[in-house]
Image (cartoon, rainbow, N blue to C red):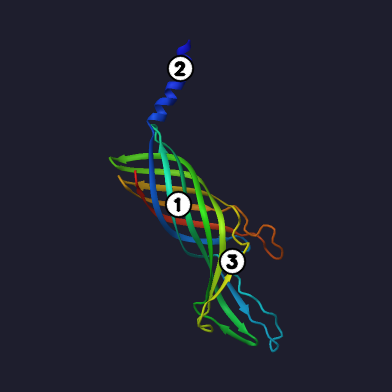
Amino acid sequence: MKILYVLPFLLFCKISLAQRTTFSVGLNSGISRFAGPSAEKTTSSSTGGPFCNCAMREASYLGSVPAATYGASLAVQHEYKNHFLLGLEAGYENLRTRINIEQYQIDDMIFNTENAYSITRNHFINIFPSAGYNFPLAEDLNLSLRGGADLGIGLSSSSRLVIRDIFEDDQHADRDGLAPGLDFRPRIEAKISGKRLGLTVNYSHGVTNWLNGWAGGPTELYMRVVRVGVQYRLF
């Protein structure tokens, strides 16, 4: 009867010893945008003034127009004998969003702008724990599918207003308090890899409300991210 107690332990040891651990570095790029009732594709702005009898109105920076994003990461992954995967990835990324500027008002003069926009840059330390399965396709060729969640630790946010029709220089502003302390984004990822190089495609769907606790108007804002990346296995 003692063998019945020993067998599960031996099986666990066999699976554990059969695992393969890999360490990789990666670079990624893609697009990110805001979503939710507070996100907008276009906006306008006004400097205010006595002739128009209007108050200054800042251009919105909560854009739903996709903008280029980039990041870098380190990853460790365990593959068991049954091809089950456990992984952990950590790195830095800059998630950017864009809103287009349709009109800019200076006192009583209204200008229709062309190619004017505001870019918001959101800096994160991102941690991605994941689990999945590896499908061997051929020798040194694998397809893996993983799921997990981005745990984005917000560092800072800032915006850059570009209206070249009116201003020669761009206008920069810090957006303190915009990036949440923790942005939780469920994520799915596919990776095709050879002996050393791998190509990843993933999508992250943020569920953390960036405007939680804000007052006035719609106060729901979420991050959406699509990435394409390259990973190089160190060992």
Packing grade of label 2 (10 A; few <14, some 14-19, many >=20) is: few
Residue extending farthest to the bottom is: 51
Which label's residue is closer to the chain start, 2 or 3? Answer: 2
Task: Name the element at disc 1.
Answer: strand
Q: Position of residue 185 (x, y in %)?
A: 55, 51
| Count of picture labels | 3
The answer to the question of whether label 2 and label 3 lie on touching residues, with beta carbons closer than 8 A, is no
Q: Nearer the viewer, mark 2 or mark 3?
A: 2
Location of residue 105 by image quarter: bottom right
Which label's residue is closer to the chain start, 1 or 2? Answer: 2
Q: Is residue 142 left or right of residue 34?
A: left
Q: Is residue 127 left or right of residue 137?
A: right
Q: Which residue is mark 2?
A: 6
The answer to the question of whether label 1 and label 2 lie on touching residues, with beta carbons closer than 8 A, is no
Name the residue at 53% across, 74% down.
Answer: 117
Task: Name the element at disc 3.
Answer: loop
Q: Position of residue 50 (x, y in %)?
A: 70, 88
**Nearer-the-camera pick, 157 or 81:** 157
Q: The residue under label 3 is which amino acid type? A: Leu
Relative to residue 35, is residue 60 depicted above or below? Answer: below
Q: Nearer the viewer, mark 1 or mark 2?
A: 2
Q: Position of residue 49 (x, y in %)?
A: 68, 85
Q: Is residue 198 left or right of residue 178?
A: left
Name the residue at 59% across, 66% down.
Answer: 62
Packing grade of label 1 (10 A; few <14, some 14-19, many >=20) is: some
Q: Position of residue 167 (x, y in %)?
A: 53, 83
Q: The residue under label 1 is which amino acid type? A: Asn
Residue 176 tag number: none
Quadrant in which the C terminus appears: top left
Residue 62 tag number: 3
Name the residue at 60% across, 54% down.
Answer: 181
